[in-house]
Amino acid sequence: MKQDIDLIWFMVFFLFCSMMCNTSNDSLERKIDDTRTEMNQKLGETQKLSAAVQAQTEAINRLNQTLQERLPAR
């Protein structure tokens, strides 16, 4: 009888731990998904900024070349 009660308590404890672990995993997965979404947004912003910087660099290079062509050689 004592062993049966101990077994029941162990099963209840195990069930409780399993439920807590599952809840913790769901929360962790949600945080991972949120972080992944945020990182993808940041990546998109970074790519846009990189393209803008590249376009500005190309425009500056074209201006420099035009100035060099129009200025008399020293």
Image: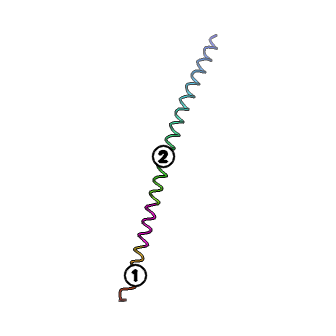
Q: Residues within 10 Å of mark 1 (few under 14, many from 20)?
A: few
Numbered label attached to residue 35? 2
At x 41%, y 69%, the residue is: 56
Give the residue at x 58% y 21%: 12
Foreground: 49 or 15? Answer: 49
Whether residue 41 appears in magenta in the rendering, the answer is no
Q: Secondary structure at mark 1?
A: helix
The picture quadrant where one finds residue 73 is: bottom left
**Image height check: is 33 above or below 58?**
above
Residue type indicated by callout 2: Thr
- The kind of residue on which mark 1 rests is Thr
Quadrant of the image for the N terminus? top right
Image position of 57 with respect to 29: above or below: below
- Measured from the top left, where is residue 28 in percent x and y? 51, 38
Magenta region: which residues? 48-58
| Residue 66, label in figure | 1
